[in-house]
Amino acid sequence: MRPPRPVRIAPSILSADFARLGDEVKALEAGGADWIHVDVMDGRFVPNLTMGPPFVSSLHKQATRPLDCHLMMVEPERWVEPFARAGAHVITVHAEASPHLHRTLQSIRAAGCKAGVALNPHTPEDVVRYVLPLLDLVLVMSVNPGFGGQEFIPETLSKTAALRAMIDASGREIALEIDGGIKIGTARQAVQAGADVLVAGQAVFAGGQYGRAIEALRQDAAS
């Protein structure tokens, strides 16, 4: 039987105060954040528009924790090198946006980053089966990507469980991340389904007590 997997908390910097970005990163790290999650949106693949490589470069100068860059964009292969140079530790692309997924994952690894694939709520888990040897992370979107503050989609739990079984059967060390609607209650459900990285935005930032919020999520995940 496998030992319990440690759960990592990855606050989404999208919910931070951008006018105080350096202070926000330091506060998250002091509060126990394991990764800093960076939501990159292009206004095409998703309706919102957010940060690019210069933003990640600025974060990289402040952060000591890994920068977990989630590219919600069309033609993500064009942006692998810029984000890698900017300081991304993990680069995750969407299966729906990358017609040559195997090649894109190869390029992420060649750039010196860990490679991830994200799946929208409707996308079945089987699309990652034949790229498992190139994966360091699978990201399950438990909301429709593009906006923060949405409600968790419970149907994504069965997909998370199926991915956990697939990863365990492969014998590979692949992180299973979940993003969207993570808070007290859904954190526990996500971990019980097999997730070991929790992305949280409002659940961390809303109360202003980052360490307390991160610890509450960690305790919920362990319950």
Image (cartoon, rainbow, N blue to C red):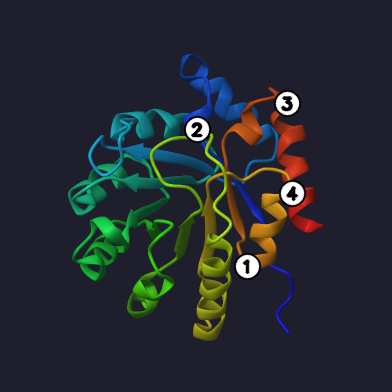
Kindly identify which residue carries mark 3. 209
- Point out the frontmost of discs 1 and 2: 1
The amino acid marked with disc number 3 is Gln
Disc ID at residue 24: none
Q: CA distance from mark 3 to mark 1?
A: 27 Å
Kindly identify which residue carries mark 4. 218
Marks 3,2: beta carbons within 8 A: no
Residue depicted at x 69% and y 30%: 210
Foreground residue among 16 and 90: 16
Marks 3,1: beta carbons within 8 A: no
The amino acid marked with disc number 2 is Ile
Kindly identify which residue carries mark 1. 194
Asked where in the image residue 110 lies, by quadrant, the reply is bottom left
212 up-or-down from 183: above or below:
above
Kindly identify which residue carries mark 2. 13
Which secondary structure, mark 4? helix
Asked where in the image residue 121 lies, by quadrant, the reply is bottom left
Foreground residue among 105 and 144: 144
Q: Earlier in the sequence, mark 3 or mark 1?
A: 1
4 up-or-down from 197: above or below:
below
Q: Is residue 136 left or right of residue 194?
A: left
- Point out the frontmost of discs 4 and 1: 1
Q: CA distance from mark 1 to mark 2?
A: 24 Å
Circle 1 packing at 10 Å, graded few (<14), some (14-19), many (20+), is many
Circle 4 packing at 10 Å, graded few (<14), some (14-19), many (20+), is many
**In this view, which residue lies farthest toward the top?**
19
How many marks do you count on the picture?
A: 4
